Structures are given as structure tokens and as C-alpha cells.
Amino acid sequence: MVIAIIGVLIALLLPAVQAAREAARRMQCSNQLKQLGIAVHNFHDANKRLPCLIKDPKWMSYKRLGTSTTLDGTDVYNYICSCLPFLEQQSIFAELNSQCQVCASVTYDRARCPEPGKTTVLTDSGTIDSPFCAKIASLLCPSDPNRNAPEGRTLGRNSYHGNRGDLMGPRTWSETRGPLSDGSQVLQELAQITDGTSNTLWASESCISESAGDTKILSGVINNTPLDQRSGSGSHTPSECANMKGISGDFKPLSGSQAFYGNKGWRWADSRYVYSIFQTILPPNSPTCLTGGGDGDDYYVGASSYHKGGVNTVLCDGSVRFISETINAGDPTKRSGEGQTGFNSANPQKWGGPSTYGVWGAIGSSNGKESNGSL
């Protein structure tokens, strides 16, 4: 009888214990995003500009010996690389700079350059681990079951993706609907976020892939474009991606011409979409899709998390907000700006007006002039 009573009590208490643990994990995740926001502000204070999406002048300054050509890989160093000193990762930052300096000071050998997608760097004394193999705990949501990379020589993972805005298209476009830009074309300051730093997102959670064949909505990536229709960026609507959502948290079954592309969040230093960028188009916890040729730019990457009902985010003023997955996200059957005066179907990235994607799109765009972009 006593054992039965104890069993009942445990059954009653276990859900409460699990809920308390998740609440603690969600708070830790929120605090980590807060520190990320502070790091961006400290970078801005030190450099009088925001860190870049790609081609940050800091990293592009390293040139191959005797040339004006940059080192391989430095063009895709993301905003996290630039903010390392302000995330209490000075040792990684110093090692990265040191290896770039060495690569730039000797007869050029690509193997000597630290690249976000490579686990090793060649030195005079042999091959060593790349700085990008470092596992940075503050970049990992404690609720994400895939946050820990396998043991051994593997690249460090990342839960926190920078905001590209409500725009689908290449990272190399000079146009940007969010606060992150191509540093070779546009350098942004906080003052240029005309919608207000308290109304514009800097980063959000996006769940890390379990494997290269991950079929889960939260963490997988699906190719929703048949092989004979991969016509490039901006030619598909968000609803095509949303319609890939199946049942029980998985994608719909695929035809023979489609496949899964995992590795979301598998490289904390890489600016290519699935590794560290997201867009405010479909609402949180919607599918992530490959929408074109798969060259690193043709993706819609969504915000997602294992916190029930939504995602933690950090805004450009450094404040943290939990955004519900039921937030108004406008009309997914249209491309950004489609149907509005001034929309150019040949150059959809040039749309500069209010977001097509409701409040979610409005808080993703930094200069959309929306009246509904407040949280």
C-alpha cells in the first residue's frame, strides 16, 4: 500500500519537476540571448558600427601575401566571429586572428587558413584543431537535445541565428531588410535602424539538426523544390515551404526528386543560412526549406525552439522577448512587397515598404516603416 502511494505521488510530482526544469532552461536560454545582445552593443561601441552578415572589414583585411586577394573562408565569417571578445571568448578570438595573420604572412597555402567549414589548420609543427571546433556553451540552448556536437574533431554548434529580415535571397545582395548586411557593400549603425532598436530583432533561436537526414519540422531542412524547378532565389512563396508541414512534428513524405538537408546550426562561425541566419517570414516553429540551388543562399530558415509555444529572441536594443508561434505573420502566399505599389518582380529584394508578413515580418525588418511592428 505504501509503495502504491509513493508511486502515485511520484507520478503527480514528475510533470511538475519536468516543468520546473524546462522553466529554468528557458530562463538560461533567455539570459544567453541577453548576453549576445550586450555583446553586439559592445562591438558597436568599440567599432562605431554593427557586425556584418558576411565580408566584415575586420576579417577581409587579411590578404594573401603580396596580393589584394583575401584569405579563403574569411568572407563567410559571421557576426559571432566578430563578437567573440565581447562574449568572453577572447582566447578563441586571439587564436583566430593569429592563424589568419600566419596565413597572410607566408606563401599562400589554403590549408593554413581557418575556414568555418573545416576542422583543421596546418601549422609548421603539423595539423591542429581549427578555432571553429570550440564548443561555446553560451551559444547553445540548454533545451535543444542536439546542442552537443559529437566528441572528437568536430565543428562547434549554434542555436542563435542572426536576423536577415523578411527577405528571401542571397546574402551578397546590397539590400537588407534586417540589421545584418554584406560588409563589402553596406556598413550599418544602430542609428540606421529607423523602425527602432526596440522594434527590430537581432537574433532568435533555431533548433539544431539531429542529423543530415533530419525529418523534424523544428530541426530539419527540406528541399521543397523539384529538380526541374530550381530557378534561383526569390522565385518561390513562403506558403510552398509552409505546406511541407506534415503530422506529428515531421515533414510531409517526399517524392523521389526531393531530399532532406540537415546540418542546421552545425557551424557557429559560418554565415551561410542554415548555420547562423534566420528570416521573419513564416511564424516561429514553421518548416525550414531549401528553395533553390542549394549554394548557401537559397533557403528559408525559420525561428524554432523546444520551449513550448514559441521562441526566445533578442532585439537590437539588447532586450529579450519570447515570441509566440501564433504571432501574426501576414500573407505567406506572396513574396515580400508583392501586390504593393513599387514592387518589382524582377528585383523583389528592392522592396522598401511595410512587411508583407504581419507583425512577425515587421519586427524583422529594420526600415520597413511599419505601424504594427511594436511588441
Image: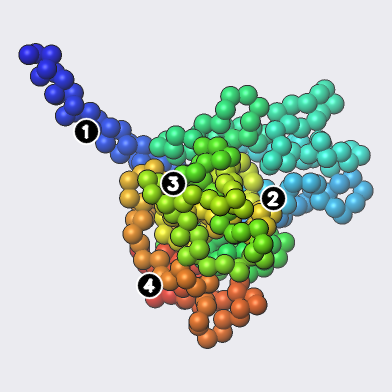
- Mark 1 neighbour density, 10 Å: few (under 14) some (14–19) many (20 or more): few
Q: Tag 2: residue type?
A: Val
Look at discs 4 and 3 and give the one toward the viewer: 3
Quadrant location of the C terminus? bottom left
Residue on which the image places disc 2: 76
- State whether residue 224 is above or below residue 101: below
Look at discs 1 and 3 and give the one toward the viewer: 3
Q: Tag 4: residue type?
A: Asn
- Mark 3 neighbour density, 10 Å: few (under 14) some (14–19) many (20 or more): some
Q: Specify the farthest residue to the top.
A: 2
User: Do residues under tags 3 and 2 come within 8 Å of each other at their CB atoms?
Assistant: no
Determine the image quadrant of residue 135.
Answer: top right
**Residue 16, label in figure:** 1
Q: CA distance from mark 4 to mark 3?
A: 32 Å
User: Do residues under tags 1 and 3 come within 8 Å of each other at their CB atoms?
Assistant: no
Residue 275: horizontal and vertical position, in percent? Answer: 59, 47
Q: Earlier in the sequence, mark 1 or mark 4?
A: 1
Residue on which the image places disc 4: 372
Q: Tag 1: residue type?
A: Ala
Residue 204: horizontal and vertical position, in percent? Answer: 46, 51
Look at discs 1 and 4 and give the one toward the viewer: 1
